[in-house]
Amino acid sequence: MDPSTDQTAHIVGQYFLERLTEVDADGVPQPALAERVTQPDPKTYVYHLRRGVRFWDGAELTADDVVYSMDHLSKPTSVSSFPWSTFKSAKAKDRYTVVVTLKQADASWPNKISHPMAPIFQKKFAEEHPGNLGKPGTLIMGTGPFEPKRFDPASGEVELTANPNWWGGRVGIEKLSLNFFTKETSLALAMRSGSIDAGVGASRAEAFQAAAGPDVEEVAFRSCSEPFLSMNVRKAPWSDVHVRRAVAYAMDHDALIKASGARAVTPGPNPTLIATPNLETVGSREQVDALLASIPQYEHSVEKAKAELAKSRYPDGVSADFTYYTWGPSGDVMQVLAAQLKEAGIEIRPRLVQYAAWIANEGQANLAERWPTLNYAGACSSPDPSGYAGYLGADSLQKGSYNFAAYGNDEFNGWWARGLATSDRAERFELYSKMVTAMAEDVPFLPLFLGSDQLYLRDGFAVADAGKWLPTDWPLTITAEH
């Protein structure tokens, strides 16, 4: 349950550990543990804490707890360093005020601090359990609406109970059990039998609902999640832009969506890493539509793919290994993609890596030098375009980042840095427009489709706020007819 020691801890912790701010339905950070945030200068944020917020043991949340949490999560040994790349220090001005200083102006900071990788927990409890914080026998001390009572590492089950003293009011669910399934079909059958009331994380939407049965309803949440292909621009044959463009033309998005079984928002995402919903947080829909209409598009065409390959250093064809990890339907997608590329003269040999091994390598330095990969995962970590900081910009090859494509020249990195340094909406849209145009021409990343996040509920249950981003608080809005 400690994100500093386990990159996946936030998947569990998002249900009971709170942050200073939370994003709303429009992707805008709003007060949470901090009732008010002020910014006296571009590198300073002042968090004014809610008074009377209690930890599960009854102790009051203070600035010292916030400072300790930030220092703990941002330490050099932390494996979840994404939110903390520009963090410099946190100081307690008084009992209820925390002053955060950044190394540089960072427009992404408000979104980063709203991410589940930036939870607040109790200083006293952490100091009493050095080396064991978050482990099954110790757990953690937070302020959230639910309190963890049991964590079984063998089964993966986490038992939570309602916090009767939660600052947000009465919690409608008395007991919440989190169960992990190695196969989506197992979760679907558990929902069909009635032993599970809600299911999340299923990537094969249509197949899942069919297996779960007619008594299960799907609720879609807004998302910028897009599984994507990355090609290492520093490694042959992917260092040849014509090879990368050949891959772009060879991809049949409709067939890839069908192979994934995902519920896709659109079959044709823009050919860059920054998704359309993210661009719409810094520009109007009309501006974004005009931008996307102006950049290169790569409609499925085997003939155009072969023509691009003929311009490359490999006119007789390409043969290379590609790595992917076990995540949802990635194996099926890889097989379909391999068949599509083969038609154009590009032969890839998919190499499967188990998810545990992938996680062990994620966040390490020089990742792109060791893993010229196909990364079948969602890249979006926040609604703001700056949420792609782990994949783009000069710092994205450092430890804790995921720039598998090793992409970014000095000009591009300059745009990225300026996009972080300014809060001016018009200037940011102009800078991200330049980056989107460059990526569309260079195609280091190729999203397969833009998806949505699904929640599945058994008949009789309903949930509000289905249009929200990062919908981690859905248990608080769930209602039951019986």
Image (tube, rainbow, N blue to C red):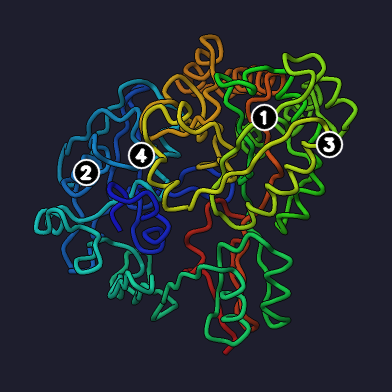
At which x and y percent is residue 327? 56, 54
> In the rendered image, which residue does mark 1 sit on?
272
> In the rendered image, which residue does mark 2 sit on?
72
**Residue farthest along the bottom direction in this orientation:** 482
Report the Cα–Cα distance between label 1 and label 3. 23 Å
**Residue farthest along the top direction in this orientation:** 411
Quarter of the picture holding the N terminus: bottom left
Any mark on residue 37, and which?
4
Q: Comparing marks 4 and 1, which lies closer to the viewer? A: 1
Asked which secondary structure carries label 1, the reply is loop
Horizontal side, residue 473 vs residue 3: left or right? right
Sequence-earlier tag: 4 or 1: 4
> In the rendered image, which residue does mark 3 sit on?
343
> Where is residue 482, by image quadrant?
bottom right
Sequence-earlier tag: 3 or 4: 4
Report the Cα–Cα distance between label 3 and label 4. 55 Å
- Kind of residue at badge 1: Thr
At which x and y percent is residue 202? 60, 63
Horizontal side, residue 391 vs residue 223: left or right? left
Q: Is residue 111 above or below residue 9?
A: above
The residue drawn where x is 67% and y is 29% is 272
